[in-house]
Image: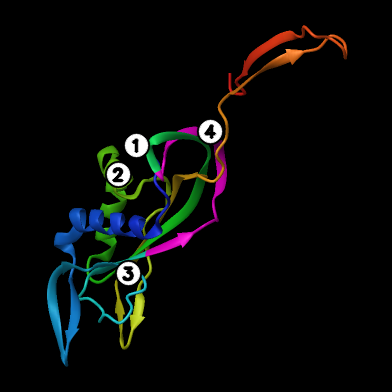
Amino acid sequence: MELQPFDYIKVQKGIISWLKEVVGSSMGKMLIEEGNSVITTDIPAVYAAPLGDLPEPSLPFIEVNYIQNDDGFVSSSGVVDVKDPNDDSKTLSVPYYDTMTNFSITLVCEGTGAQNIIRKVRNLLNVHRERQKLHERTNSGINYITRARRSPDFITTEFRESSTLTFSMNALDRYIDYDGNVFSSVDYNGGLKRTEDDNNPLPIDRKVDPYS
């Protein structure tokens, strides 16, 4: 798979689409406001935090929270041949830097059956084919999954069933420095005088390849 620039929005969208696929039938629905009315949509209630100006979905719902653990670190670097962005007929040898970014995702499920929904999600995250789907949709890999935790909320005058799950992930993306064009080899020729008055210098015709 070609390395892509890291995009946390793509990560959230990928996780949300996967959650809708595996537990969408158990979820409530997203709501929207039209004038003074609140309309129930057909969209499963799985969304990226914060909810913003949208009304709270019908229960149960899953809130997806993205937490970046670091700013990324360079895991490898080198030189790669790429097409000149200004001229497709030319090839440039430019530096590249592969950066590893670590982050966490916390899922908060609220409503009746929240614990069972989160436990199902956790079980599926341990299935190889489901991890592969997430990898393809987020360009990220899963490192560690916590256990599902019950965390009931007190809403107005009653308790609401709630459960959370956190898993850590990492993503590898590549930055290509198009302004850092480097040479792949140097050809040079000339003559080497044995004395200052040498009229018959030794010919020099050489090629230097710094990466050989």
Nearest the eye: 114 or 189: 189
Q: Which of the two labelled residues, at mark 2 and mark 1, occupies the earlier sequence position?
A: 1
Q: Please name the amino acid that badge 4 sits on.
A: Val
Q: Check contact, mark 2 vs mark 1: CB within 8 A.
A: yes
| Element under disc 3 | strand
For label 1, the crowd category at 10 Å Cα-Cα, with few meaning under 14, some 14 to 19 and many 20 or more, is few
Q: Is label 1 or label 4 in front?
A: 4
Compare marks 2 and 4 and give the one earlier in the sequence.
4
Q: For marks 2 and 1, give the CA distance.
A: 9 Å
Residue 113 versus residue 180 in the image, above or below = below
- Badge 4 element: strand
Q: Is residue 82 magenta?
A: yes
Q: Which residues are magenta?
A: 65-86
- How far apart in space, not on screen, are marks 3 and 4 (Cα)? 50 Å
Residue extending farthest right? 196
| Identity, as a three-letter code, of the amino acid under mark 2 | Glu
Mark 2, residue position: 136
Label 2 sits on a secondary structure element that is helix
Residue at left offset 49%, top offset 50%? 101
Residue pointed to by mark 3 = 162
Q: Quadrant of residue 21?
A: bottom left
Quarter placement of the C terminus: top right
Q: Mark 1 falls on what kind of element?
A: loop
First-in-chain label (1 vs 4): 1
Mark-to-mark CA distance, 3 and 2:
29 Å
Furthest residue to the bottom?
Answer: 36
Q: Residue type at mark 3?
A: Ser
Q: Which residue is mark 4?
A: 79
Is 104 part of what is drawn in magenta? no
